[in-house]
């Protein structure tokens, strides 16, 4: 398990992604991948920045090969963006938080300032529920 990010399995994937009331960003990774570990740190910051406006999940491809194979994931780490339960695009700039945030905001059609945290670090906007991925 990776601190701060929610892991997901092949078995849970369709149910969780389709039920999400917010867009979903999935990191495909494997143990021992240095770039994957570095990206996880950046993704924790991305999750904090977007708060309840984005669900960030991680999938270990060694334990869960089905979904990465369906998406033809050939290099790691990889970031897949889903909206309304459907794959939209891969997010580039892997490893650079600012580039990931910029691309996610572009996919969300959200101006940069609309998701800026207030003085208590909270973002405001649509009320969403946290999904149980257990």
Image (cartoon, rainbow, N blue to C red):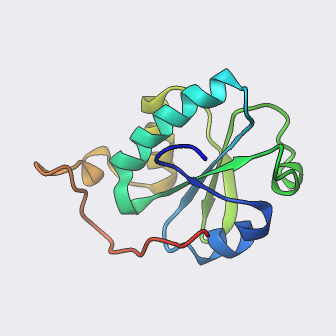
Quadrant placement of the C terminus: bottom right
Q: Residue at x 49, y 47 (%)?
A: 104
In x, y percent, where is residue 44?
Answer: 45, 42
What residue lies at 79% left-to-right and 68% top-to-bottom?
11
Relative image position of residue 9 (x, y in whole percent): 74, 60
Quick one: which residue is furthest to the front in this view? 1
Q: Quadrant of residue 84?
A: bottom right
Q: Does 99 sit above or below residue 83?
A: above
88 vs 56, left or right, is right
Q: What residue is drawn where x is 82% and y is 56%?
A: 67
Q: In which quadrant of the rendered view does residue 39 lie?
A: top right
**Nearer to us in this view, 18 or 37:** 37
Residue 60 showing in the rendered view: yes
Q: Position of residue 103 (x, y in %)?
A: 51, 41
Which residue is pictured at 69% across the width and 33% down the height? Answer: 77
User: For the image shown, how many numbered marks are present on the structure?
Assistant: 0
Using residue 119 as the reference point, say whether residue 127 is left or right of it: right
Counting from the top left corner in percent of width and height, residue 66 is at 88, 56
In front: 47, or 134? 134
The quarter of the picture where residue 62 lies is: top right
Q: Is residue 132 left or right of residue 79?
A: left
Identity of the residue furthest to the top in this view: 34
Q: Is residue 93 among the parts visible in the rendering?
A: no
Query: Is 21 placed left or right of 89 in the picture?
Result: left
Q: Relative to the observer, which residue lies in front, 134 or 36?
A: 134
Vertical order, 134 against 39 (above or below): below
């Amino acid at each position: 398990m990776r601190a701060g990010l929610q892991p997901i399995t092949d078995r849970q994937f369709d149910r969780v992604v389709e039920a999400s009331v917010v867009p979903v960003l999935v990191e495909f990774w494997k143990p021992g991948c240095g770039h994957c570990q570095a990206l996880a740190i950046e993704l924790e910051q991305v999750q904090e920045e977007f708060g309840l406006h984005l669900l960030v999940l991680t999938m270990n491809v060694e334990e869960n090969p089905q979904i990465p194979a369906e998406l033809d994931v050939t290099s790691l780490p990889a970031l897949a963006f889903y909206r309304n339960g459907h794959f939209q695009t891969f997010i580039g700039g892997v490893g650079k938080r600012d580039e990931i945030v910029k691309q996610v905001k572009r996919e969300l059609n959200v101006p940069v300032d609309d998701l800026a945290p207030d003085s208590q670090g909270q973002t405001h906007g649509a009320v969403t529920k946290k999904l149980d991925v257990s």
